[in-house]
Image: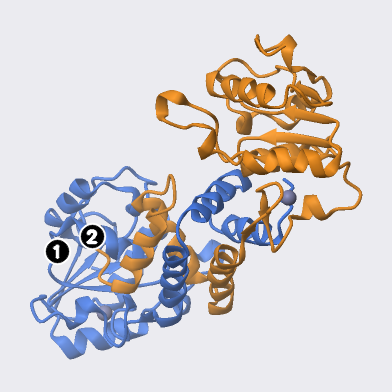
Chain colours: A blue, B orange
Amino acid sequence: MIFSSKLIEDAVEAFTRLPGIGKKTALRMVLHLLKEDKGMVRNFSETISKMREDICFCPDCNNISDGGPCAICKDPHRNKSIICVVENIRDVISIESTQQFNGLYHVLGGLLSPLDGIGPEQLQLSNLTSRIEKNEVSEIIMALSPNIEGDTTVYYIARQLQNRELTITGIARGVSFGGELEYTDELTLARSIAKRLPVETYVKTTSK
Amino acid sequence: MIFSSKLIEDAVEAFTRLPGIGKKTALRMVLHLLKEDKGMVRNFSETISKMREDICFCPDCNNISDGGPCAICKDPHRNKSIICVVENIRDVISIESTQQFNGLYHVLGGLLSPLDGIGPEQLQLSNLTSRIEKNEVSEIIMALSPNIEGDTTVYYIARQLQNRELTITGIARGVSFGGELEYTDELTLARSIAKRLPVETYVKTTSK
Ligand SMILES: [Zn+2]
Ligand SMILES: [Zn+2]
């Protein structure tokens, strides 16, 4: 495509850096913003920039935070004795959107995958143990994707925690094997959390 | 969706203001930018903002310009005796991308549509006549969408210019009736320009 304007060309190029955005879609976005007033576009770009500049990660659960501990960890009405372990921030948003879970989260930042060279040290695991000690946690819910990496991670964490006085549960399988947690609809996800099971009944662990 | 972060919520909301972007897609974009480094995201938002702040419209042809007359009007290698009349900026980009046209453009900013209340005064028509006088234009190519509004506009402009020493042509019809110019592939569009015809042979005008 030939734009005959460096300003337009640069803006189109900027949008194509976003996932799933080709040149035609990027041009449509740019021409749309061209019709909006300058204040709206300034506000748009400042919002995006501010988000990236100011976002923090919660020192306790690794969730996104607007500063210090995240909104969930700070909330006095949340049940601090239950921790739901998830792969990423998107999973926190998915589970929060069900409005069925009132405990805290722990974001791992990935799943164990020996084939891809992802070991325990690549995940945010170290502060999980300290949180359990500090907060008298009685239950850990493993809400990981139902695939090999998810099961490997559940097994690993369950073994790490096996000598502690706490229940480890896994969300009920409502998702087909190989499915992605983030694409699960809210109802299925809410039911899966409500029908959680002790971990040994759904992953064959040798830890018991 | 519940984000538990005002920064993320605002950024998602900002992206959903773009055409065709729903909440899920917006969230994917925001989480993508969250993984990029701060400098890249700052550059992204500054590029968008600068585009909207600094963009001008060419005083001669109404095309987008980075300041003063547009890159096409300024180019000494373009043939100033041929003007291609188009509906909008997107059409300029489409025709430029064929690399088959070396004249100038005139962007109308719309098409005549009496039913929608769009009359000649809503279009950028006044400076077309003055350009024709100033630049010794020998040919006007009407490159408008092949629909009722396009034909009405061709007819109107042809009648306005009927007493002048110039050829008025229309691009060859390679697009089916009702099609949109901007979705036409580059090859079809290039051929349509090469095979342009005197306007009276394809719109039944009573002006001759
Ligand atoms: Zn937190
Ligand atoms: Zn121009």
Amino acid type assigned to the residue bearing label 1 in the image: Phe
Q: Secondary structure at mark 1?
A: loop
Is B72 in front, or is A166? B72
Labels 2 and 1 touching (C-beta < 8 A)? yes
Relative horizontal placement of residue B75, taking residue A174 as reference (left or right): right
Q: Which residue is mark 1?
A: A101
> Residue B139 appears at what percent x and percent y?
82, 29
Residue at 22%, 50% in the rendered image: A186
Q: Is residue A142 visible?
A: yes
Relative horizontal placement of residue A42, taking residue A2 as reference (left or right): left
State the quadrant of the N terminus of chain A. Answer: top right
Q: Which residue is mark 2?
A: A95
Q: Residue furthest left?
A: A77
Q: Which mark is residue A159?
A: none
Relative horizontal placement of residue B8, taking residue B53 as reference (left or right): left
Residue at 13%, 85% in the rendered image: A136
Residue at 82%, 19% in the rendered image: B195
